Amino acid sequence: MSEIQKAPVIRPHLLWEYAWDSIDFSRLATVVIERVIERGNPAEWQEIVHFYGTKKILDVAEKSTRLDRKHKNFTRIYLQSGFIHDPQRP
């Protein structure tokens, strides 16, 4: 039986150009992750970690053409700092 994953709770204005009620968070993973990295608060970081997992976030950050080196480095350091708990990691 597959588990339906609840959408991450983030502020709608982070994705202002999308119809909020019809956002496919799986399909828009790159956009959502980049926006939270750039403008998200700690609670939104926790939400994307729970939804996408640390590995996915690090992959998106590293491959991103939108994020600058500062954001990419911060992402790696912040996710390894212990401030965020990834339920997919032991």
Image (tube, rainbow, N blue to C red):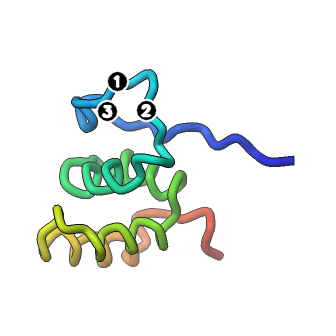
For marks 3 and 1 on the same chain, the one whose residue lies earlier in the sequence: 3
* Residue 29 rendering spot, x and y as whole percentages: 41, 52
Lateral position of residue 28 relative to residue 2, left or right = left
Q: Mark 3 points at which residue?
A: 11
Instruction: Count every numbered label the image shows and give the total.
Output: 3
User: Is the residue under label 1 in contact with that under label 3 (CB below 8 Å)?
Assistant: no
Relative to 48, is 7 above or below?
Answer: above
User: Is the residue under label 3 in contact with that under label 2 (CB below 8 Å)?
Assistant: no
Q: Identify residue type, mark 2.
A: Ile
State the image quarter where residue 86 is shown. bottom right
Relative to 36, is 20 above or below?
Answer: above
* Residue 62 rendering spot, x and y as whole percentages: 29, 76
Helix, strand or loop for disc 3: loop
- Numbered tag placed on residue 19 in the rendering: 1
Q: Name the residue under label 2.
A: 23
Relative to 46, is 58 above or below?
Answer: below
* Residue 60 rendering spot, x and y as whole percentages: 35, 67
Lateral position of residue 22 relative to residue 88, left or right = left
Of 64 and 73, which appears nearest the observer? 64
Q: Distance between the residues labelled 2 and 1?
A: 6 Å
User: Is the residue under label 1 in contact with that under label 2 (CB below 8 Å)?
Assistant: yes
Of 85 and 3, which appears nearest the observer? 3
Q: Identify residue type, mark 3.
A: Arg
Q: Which residue is drawn at 37% across and 25% down?
A: 20
Q: Identify residue type, mark 1.
A: Ala
User: Given this view, does label 3 or label 1 mark the residue nearer the observer?
Assistant: 1
Q: Residue at x 28, y 47 (%)?
A: 41
User: Given this view, does label 2 or label 3 mark the residue nearer the observer?
Assistant: 2
Helix, strand or loop for disc 2: loop
